[in-house]
Amino acid sequence: MIPKSRLYTLVKSWKNKPFQAVHDAGSTSLGPGLSDPVRLEAEALWSKRQSISYEPIFNQSGSKLCGVLFRPLLQAADPQVLRLFMDGLDAIQYWQSLSKPIPTILPIAAKTLCQPNQVDAISDLILNSRLPVGLVALGIINLPSAQFWPDYQIGLARLRRIGLMLHLLHFSGSQQELQHLEEMRFDGVHLSAQQLRADQLEQQASLQQSISALSAICQKNYGAIYISGISLISDLTAAQTYAARYCYGGLMMPPVSRHQLLQINDSRLAKAIFSVKPQ
């Protein structure tokens, strides 16, 4: 019998085709061309790119994605700093290659900047990345003691000269911090929503005075105030009270992978809250 329909012929050919099993990405059968070391490296790269490491930062109303904080560097030990720094730069290059440049804050402990070899390595990574100025910011954590202050200032100034933005994370309101912000003209200062709530409960005026001084410094040097750890609606009210330009935290959006970040334009929850909350 000669088939009258081409569709019948195609279906018959497909039906008689030998069965081929499909394996997932975690399977050991990735084909004869891939050796175990190559397979393991590919799996590690895939896993790294899916890690939930990037905390989105929005404008105060949550209507626009304005940046991201690379969380793994917040708790990085000295041997991990350069590797994680490379991971952060790799993510920025990935977003840049897809025509969605996202300003990114890479946290770093101040003690790391006291080590000239670490500063040299970070400087080389930044220059070799060839990223546009304004996409990479250093988020300074834990200012050093007076003993290491000169080395820290030298390291920070070197990185500032190659075009890095500067942010001070975990602002506590000390006079040393205020003076440092004035001298180095930081681009961003991050307040903790939890700290602001505790201060309001204790009805202390010290932090209020420090924030007033901070606002004056930021206005003078074109810096911005960020509120981190936004988790309650009252935190958004505090953001308005302190004229914070940017907010991030669980209420805005929890951390995501670098691929998921490409799909984000706004924080819908924050927008919904502001749409029903009187300004």
Image (tube, rainbow, N blue to C red):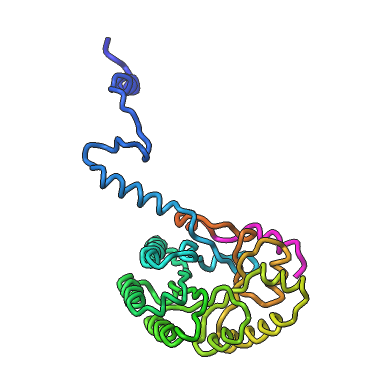
Q: Residue at x 26, y 46 (%)?
A: 37
Q: Residue at x 29, y 35 (%)?
A: 29
Residue 218's place in the image compared with 48, above or below, is below
Query: Going by the image, does 204 lie left or right of 57?
Result: right
- Is residue 269 located in the magenta-colored stretch of the structure? yes
- Is residue 142 located in the magenta-colored stretch of the structure? no
**Residue 13 found in image quarter:** top left
Question: Looking at the image, can residue 96 be seen?
Answer: no
Q: In x, y percent, where is residue 226?
A: 60, 73
Look at the image and give the residue range highlighted in magenta: 265-279
Query: Going by the image, does 55 lie left or right of 96?
Result: right
Query: Going by the image, does 57 lie left or right of 241?
Result: left
**24 or 134: nearer the viewer:** 24
Q: Residue furthest left?
A: 33
Q: Residue at x 66, y 68 (%)?
A: 193
Residue 71's place in the image compared with 178, above or below, is above
Q: In x, y percent, where is residue 236?
A: 69, 67
Q: In x, y percent, where is residue 43?
A: 35, 47
**101 or 148: nearer the viewer:** 148
Quarter of the picture holding the C terminus: bottom right
Question: Looking at the image, can residue 171 be seen?
Answer: yes
**Residue 225 found in image quarter:** bottom right
Residue 184's place in the image compared with 129, above or below, is below
| Magenta region, main secondary structure | helix
Q: Residue furthest front?
A: 147
Q: In x, y percent, where is residue 255?
A: 54, 57
Quarter of the picture holding the N terminus: top left
Residue 32's place in the image compared with 274, above or below, is above
Count of numbered badges drawn on the protein: 0
